[in-house]
Structure formats: structure tokens, C-alpha cells
Image (tube, rainbow, N blue to C red):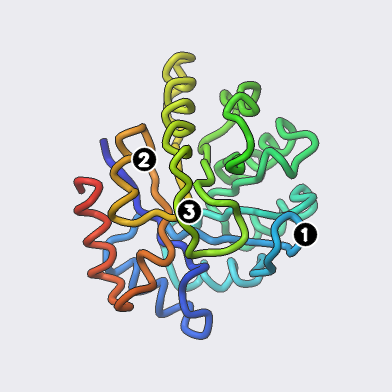
């Protein structure tokens, strides 16, 4: 199984963001993960469409944009115009989830849905046929550098089983939070196809290429 690595710019140096993205691309990252937070849905405030637009100018990699915001419907068009390739909304933040996912696709992006650690996998049952990506949060969203929540692995396995049981193919299963060489193998074994890593890529020694190589070796790529 091919596993994609999506470095999260949340842990990059924002003063040198373009350089960080270029380093990740040069080191073989498949996607760039962009965490957008509003200070309401999560207790942090990060970036919005203007930064996504700037990133679009400096990389050809898919921009995997994760909206941790209230009322995401109001900004779908703005993120589409900025160049997002994949747009993920939270099940907990969206009143009419099916309609939101359809609108994302209508705007030419791939549609993703995410759930927090406290949300059961069953909350996704009705929308699995309408998504291109499911994102399992393995930490409580809002801040980088948190510890992986061990029960997340079982949730990954449950989503994989649900997709397989219903014959739903082509859906990426992504995990975000506390992903490092010691935790990535277990979520991949449970069925994840994309791992998001922030501190494990941009932290530590700061050697993005070496950090990515360590992750790649851990997941058998």
C-alpha cells in the first residue's frame, strides 16, 4: 500500500514558510497540509485563504487544507479561489454536512471530513459515499506538538472496515496528530493512507529531508 506523507506547516517557521514548503517538496513529500483555525472552533488562530494563495505560488504539490473553523460554508469559495486541492471540514462544525461536501466538490476540490478524538466513527456513516478523504484527529485539534491519543488507531481501523464493507474505494484515510516514526506504523497498519506530521518534519534537528526520510522508513516507503 502506498502511503502519502503530508507535512503540516503549522510546525514550520512562519517567517520562512516558502522555504519550509520547498524543503518538504524537495525531500519527497506528497502533499502539504495546511491547518486553518479560527480561534472559536479550536483555541488557536492561524491562517486563511491569503496564505493558501501564497503557498499555491510556491509549490505544485496538492494543498491539503484542513478547516478547523465554525461556519466553514462561508469560506468554501475563498479557499477554492486560493488554490486548495483538498478541503476538509469537521463533522462537528457543519450543520448540513452532506450539502457542504457536495459544494466543495462542485467548486472543483476534493471533499474531506474530519472527526475529533471524542466523536465516534458512526457519526460519519451517512456521508462516507460522498467524501474523497476521511481525517481522523489523533489529538484534540488546535495546537501542534501534542501526544498521540492511542485509541485513535482503533478509529482508523473502524473507518477502514466501514469503507471496505460498503465497497467504497478511492477514499484517502488520513491521520493527524502526534505522528512520528514511532506512531506512524500503527496507523498505517490499521489502514491509513496519508499521515500528517508537523513537529516530526519541521522540528527536532530542523533537517526536513532527514526527518522525512525517517518517517518514510517507519512506514515502509
Numbered disc 1: secondary structure: loop
Task: Pick the residue in front: 70 or 168.
Answer: 70
Task: Please provide percent x and percent y for residue 140.
Answer: 59, 52
Q: Residue at x 27, y 40 (%)?
A: 2
Numbered disc 3: secondary structure: loop
Task: Pick the residue in front: 189 or 54.
Answer: 189
Q: Residues within 10 Å of mark 3 (few under 14, many from 20)?
A: many
Task: Please provide percent x and percent y for residue 11.
Answer: 48, 70
Q: Residue at x 28, y 55 (%)?
A: 181
Q: Residues within 10 Å of mark 1 (few under 14, many from 20)?
A: few
- What is the CA distance from the residue labelled 2 to the residue labelled 3? 11 Å
Residue 40 badge: 1
Q: Which residue is mark 2?
A: 187
Numbered disc 2: secondary structure: helix
Residue 177 badge: 3
Task: Please provide percent x and percent y for residue 7.
Answer: 41, 61
Q: Residue at x 20, y 48 (%)?
A: 221
Do callouts 2 and 3 mark residues in contact (Cβ within 8 Å)? no
- What is the CA distance from the residue labelled 1 to the residue labelled 2? 29 Å
Return the disc, 2 or 3, that comes first in the chain's sequence.
3
Q: Is residue 19 left or right of residue 108?
A: left
Amino acid at each position: 500500500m502506498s502511503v502519502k506523507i503530508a507535512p503540516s506547516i503549522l510546525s514550520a517557521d512562519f517567517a520562512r514558510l516558502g522555504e519550509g514548503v520547498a524543503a518538504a517538496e524537495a525531500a519527497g513529500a506528497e502533499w502539504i497540509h495546511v491547518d486553518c483555525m479560527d480561534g472559536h472552533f479550536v483555541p488557536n488562530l492561524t491562517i486563511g485563504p491569503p496564505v493558501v494563495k501564497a503557498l499555491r505560488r510556491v509549490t505544485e504539490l496538492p494543498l491539503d487544507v484542513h478547516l478547523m473553523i465554525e461556519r466553514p460554508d462561508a469560506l468554501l469559495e475563498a479557499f477554492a479561489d486560493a488554490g486548495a486541492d483538498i478541503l476538509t471540514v469537521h463533522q462537528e462544525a457543519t450543520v448540513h454536512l452532506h450539502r457542504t461536501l457536495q459544494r466543495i466538490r462542485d467548486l472543483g476540490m476534493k471533499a474531506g471530513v474530519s472527526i475529533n478524538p471524542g466523536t465516534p466513527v458512526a457519526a460519519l456513516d451517512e456521508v462516507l459515499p460522498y467524501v474523497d478523504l476521511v481525517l481522523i484527529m489523533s489529538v484534540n485539534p488546535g495546537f501542534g506538538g501534542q501526544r498521540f491519543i492511542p485509541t485513535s488507531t482503533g478509529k482508523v481501523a473502524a473507518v477502514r472496515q466501514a469503507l471496505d464493507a460498503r465497497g467504497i474505494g478511492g477514499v484517502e484515510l488520513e491521520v493527524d496528530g502526534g505522528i512520528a516514526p514511532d506512531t506512524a506504523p500503527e496507523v498505517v497498519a490499521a489502514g491509513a493512507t496519508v499521515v500528517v506530521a508537523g513537529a516530526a518534519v519541521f522540528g527536532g534537528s530542523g533537517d526536513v529531508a532527514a526527518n522525512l526520510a525517517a518517517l518514510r522508513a517507519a512506514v515502509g516507503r
